[in-house]
Amino acid sequence: MSKNKKRLLIASIGSALLMGGCLNMDTSNTNQNEEKPKASSNNTQTDERYVSVQEYVGEGYQMDGGQEEEKIAKKNREEIERAVKEFFLNQYKTEVEVQHMIGADGAATVFVKSKGLLDFHTYAIVPINDAENKVHYNKVWSEDSAVEWAMQTALYQLSNEKAFNHLKELTVELSKKYPIVGQNPKLTRKFAYTGYVTPYFYLGVLNDPFKPLLDAYLNKPDITKEEIKKIYHTSIKLKPEDVIFSIQFFMKDKTKKPDVKIFNQLSEEIKNANNLPTGSYGISLHDNYVNKLSGLGSKESSLDTNYNHLIVKE
């Protein structure tokens, strides 16, 4: 695969994979001051491009190009899965399960979830030459640092289980307290790729804050949870700006637009919550619909925390 085609594929992934922790606020590789892309539609309830977030599990999702590659990938799924699993075991000392794969221009993009000690989602790319009907099993790759960033989010979660459990419980409680929902869990399992992810939130890391943990894990794949926690508490000096949490909510009622009052209440709930993981928090509240071709929930009507005024938790 040429360098130009690699760049185009990476750009396609970066602009399109928007589900379950996929770039609605992916600050691990975007500028915080840039505006998020917005999908626009005058009426998402009647626009056939849109589907209710509770119902959406990825049907119709597409990347630019890739139709022929996807056909080839389906015919060679078993061999592709084997090559991807070997790639992660050799490069990252981690067993993975393949969750889903889709065709891309010149490749198959394969979404995986880790097995074992760490809990993260990421992806690999398997080059395909559709003209020759050939899959390059020995050239599996992933975008520079993408897997490492994903693993760092999982190492952070493992080092702070109580705080992360509190955040998980809080987001679930908020969905019961207010007329809001999160992503469909089935979608999260299939398409998430940014590391540790739930139907309500995901996180991105800046400046490799957990590299000592990652190095320890890669040097000793059988490392224990207790050893990781010890390294975290003795070697990591975390700043809130090093970790960005994106909390994503959708209106439960299909007929309702994002409610400013509810958004402000959600913001206050997060501001006033104690014992959350250290980091900077942004909240988004969308209407009930996502674009089924891209998974994009952000629209002109969406309400978002200003990137310059994220909620900081020490």
Image: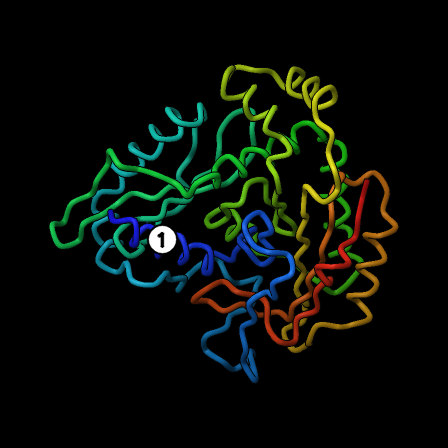
Residue at 40% across, 30% down: 88
Where does residue 160 sit, x and y in percent of width and height? 72, 30
Q: Nearer the viewer, residue 179 or 112?
A: 112
Q: Nearer the viewer, residue 147 or 83?
A: 147
Left or right, 130 with reference to 292: left
Q: Nearer the viewer, residue 116 or 243?
A: 243
Q: Residue furthest left?
A: 132
Residue at 48% across, 37% down: 147
Residue at 53% across, 53% down: 22
Left or right, 277 with reference to 71: right
Crowd around label 1: few <14 · some 14–19 · many ≥20 (10 Å)? few
* Picture quadrant of residue 287: bottom right
* Picture quadrant of residue 260: bottom right
The image quadrant where one finds the C terminus is top right
Q: Which residue does the numbered mark 1 point to in the structure image? A: 7
Above or below residue 268? Residue 314 is above
Where does residue 76 sit, x and y in percent of width and height? 22, 43
Left or right, 160 with reference to 49: right
Left or right, 265 with reference to 148: right
